[in-house]
Image: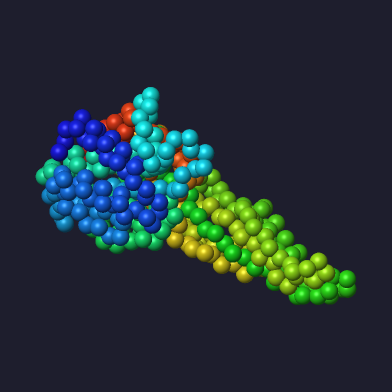
């Protein structure tokens, strides 16, 4: 199926349908069914893993490398500032309003259209694997991380997120650290105890002032922010412990575990990472998919926001129609022309390679 005008029309209708089906993270059953129905009506065989939908091109060959096309169909809960019904697809002045329209519905339906455009081609240089993933907004373990276990080995990925069709070639990772500084309890009126708050302050000052030796050309330095502190039980007792939380945004020049090791070597507090799985990502600027995008006039940049890239263990670019600045805002929308532009862009992006 490669009539682009029909694909554009069908994709816009699909997005309108998805908007009108609530699909909060881990509650995407019905949007999964909607996507399955859309694909099966067009002759595509699918596999469902949880609320993830997986499809392969018709003439898939184990002898060819595979490209992963991924975007998500879950949403956050609607911003309380909405003036329109977040679950009604409303078209006004060239805009399609509704929750998830921009993040990342426009990207998802554009990638689905691109998959369908190439679906029946017999002489592709690569296979195509489409994954409409769940739980992206909460980085859930039942999302792309689980789906990836059920797909063929892929060479690289295109992750659909709203980027104004520019190429995010690097993305920050995330670690949340629980830290506990230890002292000794005592009476505040006497010279007793070792104040754990003062111990914590020493470490907090280190988090504020430390500069990691390597800096990313796209993402800048690793950023560490102490965001929560808790200690003490009453005014006259020297606290024996002081706990604090650190938000760490990692970059493509370090893996999360490397950053964690450096931190543990420098601070006295006990440090526990809630998770190290949300890694930064990067792709070589000379990679054919990046060069294809540059040839189409697109710019490259490093993205401070996280996506399913963090959980995909291969090189990837993040690119798609819509604007990240509209994500999670009240009265979220995408321009209708952005959906058309996204479909045409993805098709051209792959045409250079396929």
For the image shown, how many numbered marks are present on the structure?
0
Q: Residue furthest left?
A: 122
Q: Identify which residue is drawn at 21% across, 48% down.
A: 37
Q: In which quadrant of the rendered image does the C terminus lie?
A: top left
Foreground residue, 208 or 321?
A: 321
Foreground residue, 49 or 310?
A: 49
Q: Is residue 205 above or below residue 345?
A: below
Q: Is residue 221 above or below residue 178?
A: above
Q: Identify which residue is drawn at 59% across, 67% down.
A: 271
Foreground residue, 209 or 136?
A: 136
The location of residue 88, given as percent across then percent down, is 37, 38
Q: Residue furthest right?
A: 190
In the displayed structure image, the side of residue 138 where residue 209 appears, left or right: right
Can residue 322 be seen from the camera position used here? Answer: no
Q: Identify which residue is drawn at 74% across, 65% down.
A: 197
The location of residue 115, given as percent across then percent down, is 22, 43
Q: Is residue 5 above or below residue 310?
A: above
The location of residue 92, given as percent across then percent down, is 38, 27
Can residue 120 be seen from the camera position used here? Answer: yes
Q: In which quadrant of the rendered image does the N terminus lie?
A: top left
The answer to which image quadrant residue 311 occupies is bottom left
Q: How is the image coloured?
A: rainbow
Q: Identify which residue is drawn at 53% across, 64% down.
A: 273
The location of residue 242, given as percent across then percent down, is 69, 67
In the displayed structure image, the side of residue 49 where residue 271 appears, left or right: right
């Amino acid at each position: 199926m490669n009539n682009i005008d029909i694909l554009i029309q069908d994709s816009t209708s699909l997005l309108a349908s998805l908007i009108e089906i609530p699909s909060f993270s881990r509650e995407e059953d019905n949007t999964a069914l909607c996507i399955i129905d859309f694909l099966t009506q067009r002759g595509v065989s699918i596999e469902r893993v949880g609320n993830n939908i997986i499809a392969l091109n018709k003439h898939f060959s184990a002898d060819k490398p595979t490209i992963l096309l991924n975007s998500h169909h879950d949403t956050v809960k609607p911003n309380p500032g909405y003036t329109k019904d977040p679950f009604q697809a409303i078209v006004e002045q060239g805009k399609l309003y509704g929750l998830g329209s921009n993040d990342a519905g426009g990207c998802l339906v554009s990638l689905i259209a691109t998959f369908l455009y190439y679906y029946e081609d017999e002489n592709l240089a690569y296979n195509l694997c489409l994954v409409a993933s769940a739980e992206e907004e909460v980085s859930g373990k039942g999302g792309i991380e689980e789906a990836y276990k059920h797909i063929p080995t892929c060479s690289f990925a295109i992750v659909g997120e709203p980027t104004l069709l520019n190429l995010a070639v690097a993305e920050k990772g995330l670690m949340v650290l629980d830290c506990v500084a230890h002292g000794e309890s005592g009476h505040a009126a006497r010279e007793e105890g070792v104040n754990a708050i003062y111990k914590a302050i020493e470490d907090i000052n280190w988090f504020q002032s430390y500069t990691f030796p390597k800096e990313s050309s796209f993402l800048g330095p690793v950023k560490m922010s102490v965001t929560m502190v808790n200690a003490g039980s009453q005014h006259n007792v020297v606290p024996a412990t002081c706990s604090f939380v650190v938000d760490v945004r990692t970059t493509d020049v370090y893996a999360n575990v490397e950053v964690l090791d450096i931190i543990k070597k420098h601070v006295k507090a006990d440090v526990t990472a809630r998770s190290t799985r949300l890694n930064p990502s990067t792709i070589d600027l000379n990679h054919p998919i990046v060069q294809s995008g540059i040839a189409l006039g697109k710019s490259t940049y490093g993205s401070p926001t996280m996506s399913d890239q963090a959980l995909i263990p291969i090189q990837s670019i993040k690119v798609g129609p819509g604007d990240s600045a509209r994500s999670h805002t009240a009265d979220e929308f995408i321009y209708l022309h952005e959906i058309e532009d996204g479909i045409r862009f993805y098709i051209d992006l792959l045409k250079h390679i396929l």
